[in-house]
Amino acid sequence: MPTYVSFFNYTSEAWKRMIDAPENRAVAARKLIERVGGTMEVFFWMFGEWDGFVVYEVPDPAMAATFSGVVTASGLIERVKTNQVLRMDDVRVALDLAKSIESSYVPPGEQREWLADYDALG
């Protein structure tokens, strides 16, 4: 399954609610991720630009978007940034494939012919 990391920021209202009634937000995140067919690896709060992040696997990008959409729709998360991450075995496959096709790539400035068809593209 694809792996994603989502960074998030809580609203001031969310912070007020959590201070008034502290709870483990990882439980809520895990429950929602499992509802979309995934598994949560880690949930951390952090200092800095983001309040925290969660790393999880879900079956496809639509399920990652579903997770992010539901959380954001609560109105208590003000910003979310999600990235798909690659495990080392996926990177190895990509690097091996890149090596096998790199001779097909013509870098900028090395193409010696101009195709009139390009002009039609605008």
Image (cartoon, rainbow, N blue to C red):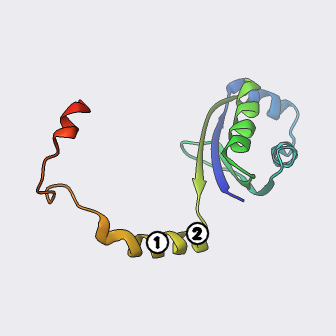
Residue ID for mark 1: 97
Quarter assignment of residue 40:
bottom right
Which amino acid, by three-letter code, is at mark 2?
Asp
* In the rendered image, the vertical position of residue 11 relative to residue 94, given as above or below: above
Quarter of the picture containing the C terminus is top left
Across and down, in percent, residue 114 comes to: 13, 47
Across and down, in percent, residue 86 comes to: 58, 63
Q: Secondary structure at mark 2?
A: helix
Across and down, in percent, residue 39 comes to: 81, 56
Q: Is residue 62 left or right of residue 37?
A: left
Between residues 83 and 76, which one lies in front from this camera angle? 83
Q: Which mark is drawn over residue 31?
A: none
Q: CA distance from mark 2 to mark 1?
A: 11 Å
**Disc nearer the start of the sequence (2/1):** 2
* In the rendered image, the vertical position of residue 121 relative to residue 47, given as above or below: above
Residue ID for mark 2: 90
* In the rendered image, the vertical position of residue 38 relative to residue 50, given as above or below: below
Q: Secondary structure at mark 1?
A: helix
